[in-house]
Amino acid sequence: MMDFKRITEQLNLRAQCQRYRVPLLQCPQFLFLIMGIIIIGAAITAYLIGMRYIEDPEIIALMVLTLSVILFIFTYIITISFERLAEANRMKSEFVKIVSHQLRSPITNVSWAIDSLMSGALGRIQKSQLEYFKILKENSSRMKELIRDLLITSRIEEGALPIRKEKVSLVKVVESLISEFRPFAFASNVKVEFDFDKDLPEIFTDYHQVKVVIENLLDNAIRYIKKKGKVKIRLGKKETDIYFRIEDNGIGIPEDDQKYLFQKFFRSKSGEKQGTGLGLFITKSITERLNGKIWFESEEGKGTTFWFSLPIK
């Protein structure tokens, strides 16, 4: 009974792909099936060619059998290699998910304790001590950001990030985020400008996910301006889509790095070294999950412009 159940699970391509958290075209069992079809096709082709040019049927049979065995061995080796890679990827994702969940509560508690100490509610804090508390708070914030990005990435890869659509005003989302980022922008000597078309309609989308997209883009735009600079945000409507544009006059993205920009854990050599390398991967993944598109233009030393579009309905 157990062997039959195991065989049934192995034949269930969808379940296997979900287990490995890979798309169908990268699933080892699907590749094995495709290679099996290729082997059958190659064997039939070899047989037909042999029938035409070789008179001895035994030689034809031997030729077809030899070809089939060789192709089967190659198929088995390739499939096993892909299966090991897929299993390693699954275990890595599972490890990241477990560790992120386990770290979230302690980091939250540490952040809460630091805030309590800095407030002076538990006793007077000396000025020299306050500087160290600020360092602790900054680093705990980075840890929280890393854990958040890892959890979102894990859920995206698992297909476990549900989309809960509702009426959303992108104008209000942008204004709220600009207000949240105002201290960061001020400390970075960056001015944020926002312009939008009048009577811009609300869109039917996931509020929390689209907020993450804009938050990541705004954070990057401010972060990668090394001197006094400006960030311009523009919202507009074109046919059935809403377009978001964010332009900065920061350091720009080297041409050699641009093709890797949306990959997981990629960080440009000329950029910020403190980020997770997941922000733009998450941004692109969410935008596409919401049936939108994202693209950019950049020139090193002159700045970067990102656009994304989302359907109104």
Image: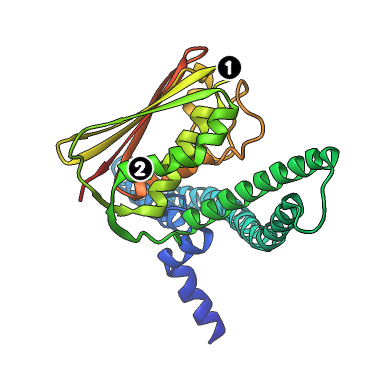
Question: 223 or 34: which is nearer to us?
Answer: 223
- Residue located at (51% from left, 64% from top): 19
| Spatial CA span between label 2 and label 1 | 78 Å
Q: Helix or strand or loop: what does disc 1 sit on?
A: loop
Instruction: Report which residue position mark 2 lands on.
Output: 54
Three-letter amino acid code of the residue under disc 1 = Lys
Which residue is the extreme one toward the bottom?
Answer: 1
Query: Residue 268, how many percent across, how many down?
Result: 58, 26
Q: Is residue 83 above or below residue 295?
A: below
Q: Residues within 10 Å of mark 1 (few under 14, many from 20)?
A: few
Three-letter amino acid code of the residue under disc 2 = Ile
Which residue is the extreme one toward the left?
Answer: 239
Question: 155 or 308: which is nearer to us?
Answer: 308
Query: Residue 42, how many percent across, how many down?
Result: 37, 47
Residue 277 in sight: yes
Residue 39 in sight: no
Instruction: Report which residue position mark 1 lands on.
Output: 227
